[in-house]
């Protein structure tokens, strides 16, 4: 493999990032795995190792590194404080982000990655390659180092495991991009304006809100369901941060409509993403306020750590969404 081929292999970086992020749910860890993958390629080139198919070599390497990473990370996930959500991958009009982030596979939504937490590392690799990236069984087998028959069994087992998960195996078909962004605009407008009726008209009957503060920022202790409870939570939570001078900036988050919350000093305070189904209803709201998961987006705010402002008419302010 020539140095020219090594340089050309950089074109696979977006694909490798998507695979690594699908495996780990972490932007920082995914970037580290991709970097380690290219370091391995450079070492192989210096050693004169013949690599007939750079793409296959790279995808195999990053997937196997991801499997090893998940095995070491499982204990940390089991002791995580509160609900775990992936680190958000955000693109906005003013901040498109790195190319590999902008090209993230649309299938790697928050809801999809949360479901994958129920799988073992090898199951997750097989399921991600097959379901998110459309790899054929021969490619999947070569990548994870198993037989095709074994990969079929692993995928079947993974599907059954997801079917037994709390959220069920089937994710709603996403809304058309333009439709979803228009609904998101109206959704956040209603939430900021305290319009409960408008919000209720946009929520699916089985809507759920999840929050990830990692024990370091205000967040939900557990998921909230039922449209009226969700609507009240959203209105109360957004009222709290707006009173502290925050603003919401529309964004694409993991291929879905959402918003980044900035404080008065333009620091990142949180990220909200909506799962909108093809019928135009919000099925899930995911909110990430854990500062450890926001650092890749810019300077991080302490807004989530501040006490909620009190008004004479207030009782106990609800947690941030």
Image: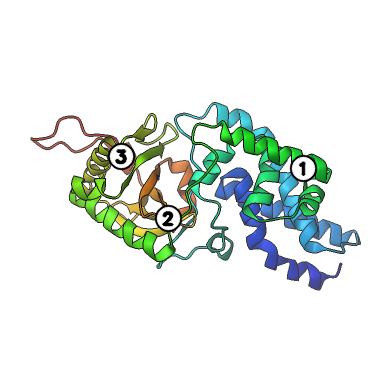
Quarter of the view holding residue 218: top left
Task: Determine the CA span between mark 2 and mark 3.
Answer: 27 Å
Task: Determine the CA span between mark 3 and mark 1.
Answer: 42 Å
- Identify the residue position indicated by label 3 in the image: 320
Q: Earlier in the sequence, mark 3 or mark 1?
A: 1
| Coordinates of residue 265 in the picture (x, y in percent) | 30, 54
Work out whether residue 70 or residue 282 is closer to the camera in this orientation and state it.
282
- Identify the residue position indicated by label 1 in the image: 151
Q: Secondary structure at mark 3?
A: loop
Q: Earlier in the sequence, mark 2 or mark 1?
A: 1
In the image, 287: left or right of 126? left
Residue 96 shows up from this direction? yes
| Coordinates of residue 125 in the picture (x, y in percent) | 69, 44
Q: Nearer the viewer, mark 2 or mark 1?
A: 2
The quarter of the rendered structure image containing the C terminus is top left
- Residue ID at (28%, 53%): 188
- Identify the residue position indicated by label 2 in the image: 278
């Amino acid at each position: 493999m020539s140095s020219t081929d090594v340089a050309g292999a950089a074109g696979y970086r977006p694909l490798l990032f998507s695979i690594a992020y699908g495996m780990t749910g972490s932007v920082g860890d995914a970037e580290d795995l991709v970097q380690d993958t290219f370091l391995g390629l450079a070492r192989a080139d210096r050693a004169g190792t013949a690599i007939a198919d750079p793409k296959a070599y790279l995808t195999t390497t990053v997937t196997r590194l991801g499997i090893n990473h998940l095995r070491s990370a499982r204990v940390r996930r089991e002791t995580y404080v509160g609900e775990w959500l992936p680190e958000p991958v955000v693109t906005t009009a003013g901040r498109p982000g790195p190319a590999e982030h902008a090209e993230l596979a649309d299938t790697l939504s928050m809801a999809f990655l949360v479901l994958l937490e129920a799988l073992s590392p090898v199951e997750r690799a097989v399921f991600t390659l097959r379901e998110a990236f459309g790899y054929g069984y021969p490619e999947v087998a070569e990548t994870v180092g198993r037989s095709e028959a074994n990969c079929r069994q692993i995928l079947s087992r993974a599907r059954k495991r997801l079917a037994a998960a709390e959220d069920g195996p089937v994710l709603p078909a996403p809304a058309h991009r333009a439709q979803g962004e228009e609904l998101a605009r109206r959704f956040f407008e209603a939430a900021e304006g305290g319009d409960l009726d408008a919000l209720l008209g946009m929520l699916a009957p089985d809507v759920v809100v999840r929050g990830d503060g990692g024990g370091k920022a205000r967040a939900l202790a557990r998921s909230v369901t039922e449209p009226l409870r969700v609507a009240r939570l959203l209105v109360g939570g957004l009222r709290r941060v707006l009173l502290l001078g925050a603003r919401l900036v529309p964004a694409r988050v993991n291929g879905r409509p959402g918003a980044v919350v900035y404080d008065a000093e333009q620091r990142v305070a949180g990220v909200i993403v909506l799962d909108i189904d093809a019928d135009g209803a919000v099925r899930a709201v995911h909110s990430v306020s854990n500062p450890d998961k926001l650092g890749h987006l810019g300077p991080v705010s302490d807004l989530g750590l501040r006490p909620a402002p009190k008004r004479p008419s207030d009782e106990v302010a609800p947690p941030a969404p």
